[in-house]
Amino acid sequence: MMVLLAGGSVACAQQTPTAPVAPIPAQIITARKVFIANGGVDATSLTAFRRAKEPREPYNQFYIAMKKWGRYEVVGAPGEADLVLQVSFSAPISDCVKSTSYQPQLTLIIFDTQTHFRLWTFTEPVQGAFLKSTWDKNVEKGIGSLIEDLMQLVAEHAVPGP
């Protein structure tokens, strides 16, 4: 019985070490100003957005959401910004052997304006819809998810203030 109890306490003491957390680029945390770039939509999606008479819908919604969040000052030119946030929409084909379907998605790419390097990428799915009102809600939800991804990244790695 003593052997079992002793063995149990050793097992508890030998915890699995946690993997180190990879750092994120400091520019994302320290940036104050951003320029929002329209990465556009792919050819398949463009047809649908034009039919709805809103070819810049993803860009417009992302711009409004970023202004509403208020974490970064949105500026009018890349040269004035610390980061460029490029939002785009695509609907790559998903081949499911017997049928082919589209997988609509929003992508946010964060670029450093000094080095022009891509620092981070987020991708969020957008549910398809038959009704325009449902589609608008789904795009808005996808944009909200991109903003939440960025908010979470910034919050997790925020530098404490003085």
Image (cartoon, rainbow, N blue to C red):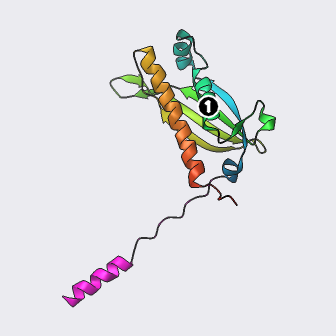
Residue 96, position as x, y percentages in the image: 36, 29
Left or right of residue 4: residue 69: right
Residue 28, position as x, y percentages in the image: 67, 48
Residue 143, position as x, y percentages in the image: 53, 31
Residue at 50 percent across and 27 percent down: it is: 140
Quick one: which residue is furthest to the right in this view?
Answer: 79
Which quadrant: the C terminus?
bottom right
Q: Is residue 43 above or below residue 80?
A: above
Q: Is residue 18 magenta?
A: yes
Left or right of residue 31: residue 13: left
- Quarter where residue 99 is shown: top left
Residue at 51 percent across and 14 percent down: it is: 48
Quick one: which residue is furthest to the left in this view?
Answer: 1
Graded by Cα atoms within 10 Å as few (under 14), some (14 to 19) or many (20 or more), the crowding at tag 1 reads many
Residue matched to label 1:
87
Residue 73, position as x, y percentages in the image: 71, 38
Left or right of residue 147: residue 6: left
In magenta, the rendered stretch is 1-24
Badge 1 marks a residue whose secondary structure is: strand
Residue 32 in sight: yes
Residue at 45 percent across and 20 percent down: it is: 135
The disc labelled 1 sits on which kind of residue?
Val
Q: Is residue 29 above or below residue 129?
A: below
Q: Is residue 90 magenta?
A: no
Number of marks in the rendered image: 1
Quick one: which residue is furthest to the bottom in this view?
Answer: 2
Q: Is residue 51 above or below residue 65?
A: above
In front here: 119 or 159? 159
Which quadrant: the N terminus?
bottom left
Left or right of residue 88: residue 18: left
Residue 104 in sight: no
Q: Is residue 81 above or below residue 141?
A: below
